[in-house]
Image (spheres, coloured by chain):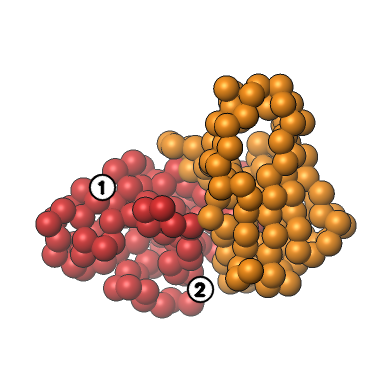
Chain colours: A red, B orange
Amino acid sequence: AQRVTQPEKLLSVFKGAPVELKCNYSYSGSPELFWYVQYSRQRLQLLLRHISRESIKGFTADLNKGETSFHLKKPFAQEEDSAMYYCALSGEYGNKLVFGAGTILRVKS
Amino acid sequence: IAGITQAPTSQILAAGRRMTLRCTQDMRHNAMYWYRQDLGLGLRLIHYSNTAGTTGKGEVPDGYSVSRANTDDFPLTLASAVPSQTSVYFCASSDGPGRGNYGYTFGSGTRLTVV
């Protein structure tokens, strides 16, 4: 079975501090991992995909198959990063995504 | 229309009533999905459609039905609403099916309250 775990419901950091949003997954095959972001009163949007190995808005995420993790990181948080972040997995169900419970990131000034 | 349009934006519905949530996309995506978003549970897949004319059940399909008569439209129907169906409903689409998809495009959501 596929499962995505985001252990933190809320992560609160000060502006300029490093950020790490944790994501662990359960899947026996070769997964595709994604991070989605939902800003206040906006629709969910794709932040980044592990296969593209890109950096979006200063965020990066590395797939660690040994630890089955895909943590989202940013070296210096900004107030505009405050949002709900979802980790998602595409595995045995083809293109269908399984989402984690989400983590609210609050960046304080 | 640009992307995915959902209607209504919000609705208060009496228990036992029938309700159809509308979803239309203009990107000619093959695959479409319905998710419900609940605090602490994330997004859970209700139903999906890999291409026009086909549908499938997701993780939480009970009490919901869908149809996919054409590429653009993917309505979600609650035959007899119950309070546990109070949620925010998101429609999404992708180029899928198949591996290596480029992620979903989401609608703005429908906030449904069943009383």
Give A99 or A69, whichever is nearer the viewer. Answer: A99
Where is residue B30, by image quadrant?
bottom right
Q: Quadrant of residue B26?
A: bottom right
Give the class, few, some or many, for how many residues have Cα within 10 Å of label 1's Cα (few <14, many ≥20).
Answer: some
Which element type, helix, strand or loop, lies under badge 2?
helix
Quadrant where the N terminus of chain B is found in the figure? bottom right
User: For the residue labelled by badge 1, is the local secondary structure a helix, a strand or a loop?
Assistant: strand
Q: CA distance from mark 1 to mark 2?
A: 26 Å
Q: Chain of mark 2?
A: A
**Percent x, y of residue B28:** 73, 72
When asked about the image quadrant of residue B57, the answer is top right
Image position of A92 (left or right of A28): right
Q: Could you tell me if residue A90 is visible in this image? A: no
Q: What is the x, y in percent for residue B50?
A: 77, 60
Amino acid type of the residue tagged 1 in the rendering: Leu
**Where A52 sits versus B1, above or below?**
below
Horizontally, is A91 left or right of A68 in the view?
A: right
Residue lying at 43% horizontally and 67% vertically, measured from the top left: A47
Residues under numbered marks 1 and 2 in contact, where contact means CB atoms less than 8 Å apart: no
Horizontal side, residue B107 vs residue A109: left or right: right
N-term mark: 1 or 2: 1
Identify the residue position indicated by label 2 in the image: A51
Q: Nearer the viewer, mark 1 or mark 2?
A: 1
Query: Along the line of sight, which residue is nearer the eye, A89 or B18?
Result: B18
Q: Which residue is depicted at the point 16% across and 53% down?
A: A108
Question: Which residue is at a point 38% across and 57% down the rendered structure image?
Answer: A39
Task: Indicate which disc residue A11 carries.
Answer: 1
Screen quadrant of the C terminus of chain B: top right
Residue drawn at x 26%, y 63% as measured from the top left: A80
